Amino acid sequence: MENIMKCEGFNYAFDQNACQSCSGKCCIGESGYIWVNEKEREAIAQKLNMPKASFIDAYLAKIRYRFTIKEIAYEGGYGCVFFDMEKRSCSIYEVRPEQCRTFPFWDYFKENINEVAEECPGIIRS
Ligand code: SF4
């Protein structure tokens, strides 16, 4: 079934079916920040059935005034702590942060399409 997403201002589309055969390249690889806002912190803590403060201590790092999800060393690079290495998928998928939901349509990639196309097998250039 065709499952193509488009986003205004981007000169590529995204085939969501590609996620099924991808090994989670957008969740592992180079180290980076995965920002989590207040509402998202609540939702993830709830899903994990943890008090918010314990969830923050265990899974987030504070960078100035923002929180990012911790990473662990993985396959010569890094992986998000919520990436399930066995199933090769996000373990908090339904409550994943906005940053993850909007991938691969990030402003940065408008000018760097080669970078996102290298990482994501679902990119379809227009
Ligand atoms: S929260 Fe989920 S979708 Fe986002 S980087 Fe981590 S494993 Fe990937």
Image: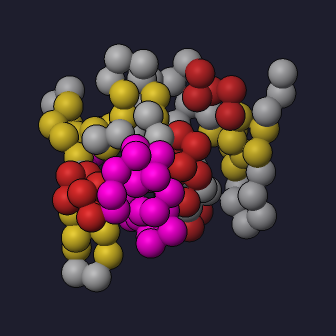
Q: Quadrant of residue 79 in the image?
A: top left
**Nearer-the-camera pick, 59 or 53:** 53
**Nearer-the-camera pick, 37 or 46:** 46
**Nearer-the-camera pick, 38 or 87:** 38
Position of residue 63 measured from the top left corner of the image (x, y, whole percent) = 22, 73
Query: Position of 15 compared to 109: left or right?
Result: right
Query: Position of 111 compared to 123: left or right?
Result: left
Label count reads: 0
Which residue appears at 58% of the width and 43% of the height? Answer: 94
* Vertical side of 29 occupied by 32: above or below: below
Q: Is residue 5 located in the magenta-colored stretch of the structure? A: no
Residue stretch rendered in magenta on the structure: 29-52
Residue 82 visible in the shown view: yes
Query: Position of 76 compared to 124: left or right?
Result: left
Which residue appears at 53% of the width and 40% of the height? Answer: 93
* Vertical side of 17 occupied by 38: above or below: below
Which residue appears at 76% of the width and 45% of the height? Answer: 5
**Quadrant of the frame with the N terminus:** top right
Query: Position of 85 compared to 87: left or right?
Result: left
Position of residue 84 measured from the top left corner of the image (x, y, whole percent) = 36, 28
Which residue appears at 54% of the width and 49% of the height? Answer: 95
Q: Is residue 44 located in the magenta-colored stretch of the structure? A: yes
* Vertical side of 26 occupied by 97: above or below: below
Q: Quadrant of residue 67 in the image?
A: bottom left
Residue furthest to the bottom: 65
